[in-house]
Every structure is written in structure tokens, then in C-alpha cells.
Image (tube, helix red, strand yellow):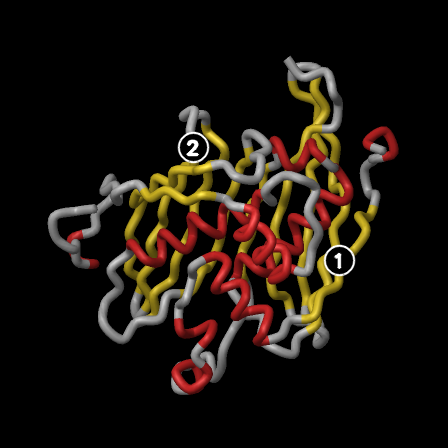
Amino acid sequence: MLTEIQEGKALNPVVKHITQEKINVYAEASGDFNPIHINESFAAKTPLGGTIAHGMLSLAYVSEMMASAFGRNWLSEGKLRAKFKEPARPGDTLTVDGRVDCIEKKDDVSYANCVFECRNQKGEMIVTGEAIVRLSNDKK
Amino acid sequence: MPDRAISYEELTPGYKFPPTTFELSASFVSKYLKAVDSESDGFVPPLAITACAIAATTKSVPLPPDTTAIHASQELEFFKMVPIGTTIECRIGVLQKISRGKMSMLILELEIFDKDKEKVQSGKATIALPT
């Protein structure tokens, strides 16, 4: 699978629908009960105007795309850098896209430098960033 | 836990919060996978581990009154796969504290270890605090 990776290759996109129920379950699982995520009356009074999904929920979809493309190499030694640009809200459908920007070799080990973005159904950027994953299996 | 709660004003670069531990139980992983609409491959999803660390962070950081914390950016590096049932320890420290007009930014350093004291993840979280 990793032998098929080359510069410019698009990664299989991940599409997810955000609901308040998923946000609530995420809050329970993670223990992050910040009211901006789960308390609709509180959130409505803030500048955000309503509840928003945890940034890490959107980022989980990015990780799913990377794991799907790179398998255990991602899970055991992936690196990422992400910026949360706009909040994802209940009712949003998020699409995570990514591609291999370049392949670099360091000490005889190849790494794929990927770029990714997560947008909502209006095309608004929710998360953007870069990820690096080892390709070759001959590390060390 | 600290002897007394530290205030936001007292947070300075270099400050280390007391470590927190989590058991990455099968029920936790199951609930996490339901929330993120995904399936298990027998290991704890790395972002599930990060989620615990971020939650620990938001609980640890004493926010100024009437402040809503916004997760602005995240850097992560994974070092090993973690089996379900592992207990992890999260260590969080303050890297930078920045004030720009009506916005404060807190940059936190995260390190996560397993029970053998092997590093599982590390990263940086930037928390924006509009005032």
C-alpha cells in the first residue's frame, strides 16, 4: 500500500456529519465538558452564538484519513500540525481532504509530507495543516 | 494535586501542572469511537489519547472569569501504538503566555507516557482566550 504513495497523490477523503449528540458523546468520552460545546443556552449568549464541536473531534477525522492511507506507520509515529480556523457546528457536514505534498528522504528513510484541510458544507475552512509520516519500513 | 488552585495570572512559562492519569479502557475507547464515527483496530486511536490530555488541560488551566477558551492550534507527534487497557500519564506545562489586545494566548506543552514511562505522544496546544 505504501509503495503506491507518490508526490501529488490525493488521500481518500473522509466525510462526517456533526450532530449535537456526537458532540455530547465526545464530551463524555474525553471528559471535556466545556459549556461552549454542550450547553446550548450558555453557548447562545457567547460571541459564537451556539454550541461548537470540540476542535479535537474535527482533528480525529484528519487522523482517520491519515490512518486509512498510511496504516500503522501513522498510528505509531505520525506527526501533525493543525490550525483550527472556524468552529464546526451541529448540522455541519465536514469533508477532510489531503494529498502528499512531497516525499523527503532523511537518513535513508522516506517520509511523506502531506497537507490537509477540513471544510464544512459551505466550503468554509474548519481545520488546515500538515502531517508527516514515515513511508519506508527500514527505519534504524 | 496542588496545595491550592493556581490563578491564571500566576501561570508563567515553565509552570508544570500536576500530572494526571487515565485508564484507556475498552468502554472509553468504545465511547470515543462512537463519538468520532469510527471503528476499532484493537489499539487506542491516537487522537483519543490526545483528547484525554486536552480535557486534562482544560480542567487544569484556571481561566479568567467569564472567559471561553478556544482551541486555536495543535501540534502532535506519536511515538508508539497503545493497546486498549493501558494507563497513561499526561504531563502539561506552560510554554508561552501571550497577550495581544483583547486576546490572550496560552501555549501548552503536552507529554504523554505509558506505565513503563515510555513516551506515547508529545505536542503543543494553543488556547486562545478572548477577553
- The label nearer to you, 1 versus 2, is 2
- Which mark, residue B113? 2
Q: Position of residue B78 (x, y in %)?
A: 55, 35
Residue farthest right in this picture? A4
**Image marks 1 and 2: residues in contact by CB distance under 8 Å:** no
Where does label 1 land, which residue? A14
Q: Secondary structure at mark 2?
A: strand
Binning the other alpha carbons within 10 Å of mark 1 as few (below 14), some (14 to 19) or many (20 upward) gives some
A24 sits left or right of B96 in the view: right
Chain ID, mark 2: B
Relative height, residue A6 to residue B74 (above, below): above
Residue A45 or residue A130, whichever sits in front = A45
Q: Amino acid at mark 1?
A: Val
Q: Position of residue B124 (x, y in %)?
A: 43, 44
Binning the other alpha carbons within 10 Å of mark 2 as few (below 14), some (14 to 19) or many (20 upward) gives some
Give the position of the N terminus of chain A as an image quadrant.
top right
Relative height, residue A73 to residue B130 (above, below): above
Residue shown at 16%/53% (left/top)? B10
A117 sits left or right of A35 in the view: right
Residue shown at 43%/38% (left/top)? B88
Q: Amino acid at mark 2?
A: Phe
Relative height, residue A29 to residue B76 (above, below): below
What is the spatial separation of the Cα atoms under label 1 and label 2, in whole angstroms? 30 Å
Residue B43 placement: quadrant: top right
Residue farthest top in this picture? A140
